[in-house]
Image (cartoon, helix red, strand yellow):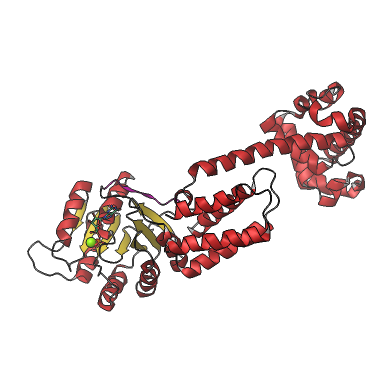
Amino acid sequence: TLSERLSGIFNQLRGKGRLTDADIDATARQIRMALLEADVALPVVKTFIDQVKQRCRGAEVSKALNPAQQVIKIVNEELIAILGGESRRLSLAKNPPTVIMLAGLQGAGKTTLAGKLALWLKGQGHEPLLVAADLQRPNAVEQLRVLGERAGVEVYAPEAGSGVGDPIQVSRDSLAHATRHARDIVIIDTAGRLGIDQEMMAQAAAIRDVTNPDEVLFVIDAMIGQDAVTTAEAFRDGVGITGVVLSKLDGDARGGAALSVRHVTGQPIMFASTGEKLTDFDVFHPDRMASRILGMGDVLTLIEQAETVFEEEQKERMTQKMLGGESFTLTDFLEQLLAVRKMGPIANILGMMPGMGQMKDQLADLDDKHLDKVTAIIRSMTQAERDDPRIIKGSRRLRIANGSGTTVNDVNQIITRFFDAQKMMKQMGGMMGMAGGRKATK
Ligand code: GDP
Ligand code: MG
């Protein structure tokens, strides 16, 4: 599977200390092969690989992650991006009923989805109406009736035994029926053919024209493979689609269709259908699909943890920087202040250092309200002012006070306090010397 292939590729990177361009090229080539074998469409693969390569090249040398982890992180993020990033919600009509039309090939899972969607919407307090507009197959209406009954949702269909109905007429009439019976969402189940077919497409377009749907959901079998692209293109051009539903994701779908469809249609994958039961259904989560394709849930968690630990180390480095004195700027000061709520007051941090008792008193009045004021003041400064507060004279002080909704007096106080802190840190830095520094903060 794609997951296994990718794991293999990442394993080869594991021992490496640093990623060379040759490593990146070789890895990209292998990921490309793996994606193509998983039936991802070529243009999609190309876009994807270009993105990944570019980001691997530009990646800063990470202290937190080894090269393999870094590549996995990038591939994961790009997978999520190509799968659509965030999930989107159904758009509902301002004036009910909202019309949701389902389109897709025969066997894609439209009718099953209609039942699932109806049940799901009912659970959210809606009153859906299912509409049987697939009058092609003899038992299609019956199939929807059974599903509707199980979901406890009304099914609108031509009278039983009335012979062949007109799906366009049924669709149109269903809207009036929905209004009469206070159904706020109409779900129209349409007919599909085994292959793409002019007549079918024309019928779907006609149903679209008479019902003016708020959503046209394209239902596609996740196992369809390379055909995903031509099928998606045909429905995109023939009917126009606003969203995608991936069905049969419970099987060992290789993920290729999911990657291609989003890219080809430019429309989000909104739902996932994952079995034959009515409840086998969920909103589509790009991040979960990405980690399923990567098959690396645990590795991704580890990567997140590694980065968190790294952030901790950065905080420690910050403390070191404070001890450097001169290089400690207002920007650092602000960053430090913003971290205060998370890591405890500066007074405490400094308290952990030997000989910092006096500093502790100086910073003791940094309560939350005061902190907000200080933050506002420093944020109202330009970068140049933050880097060298000595340039902050009369008119600048007034501008900063106005910008931060404080007084010139407040601004003066902060600047004086900062200079004091800076001076003190310089002394401390000198006292503690280079060698003792890092250990002493522990
Ligand atoms: P339609 O022709 O597009 O209306 O497709 P159907 O809803 O009739 O589904 C075709 C077949 O696929 C039926 O046997 C369904 O039970 C099955 N099916 C639909 N959705 C899923 C799914 O998410 N997982 C599985 N395993 N089977 C599904
Ligand atoms: Mg059907």
> Of residues 103 and 296, which is closer to you in this image?
296
Q: Could you tell me residue 63's position as x and y percent?
A: 70, 44
Q: Is residue 226 above or below residue 279?
A: below
Q: Residue at x 70, y 52 (%)?
A: 60
Q: Quadrant of residue 377?
A: top right
Taking 365 as reference, is 132 left or right?
A: left
Q: Residue reaching furthest bottom?
A: 198
Q: Could you tell me residue 36's position as x and y percent?
A: 46, 64
- Looking at the rendered image, the quarter that the C terminus falls into is top right
Residue 281 colored magenta? yes
Q: Could you tell me residue 222's position as x and y percent?
A: 36, 59
Give the image quadrant in which the ligand numbered 1 is located.
Answer: bottom left
Q: Is residue 309 visible from the viewing direction of this image?
A: yes
Q: Could you tell me residue 285's position as x and y percent?
A: 44, 50
Q: Residue reaching furthest left?
A: 161
Q: Is residue 337 visible from the viewing direction of this image?
A: no
Q: Is residue 405 above or below residue 34?
A: above
Q: Is residue 219 above or below residue 16?
A: below
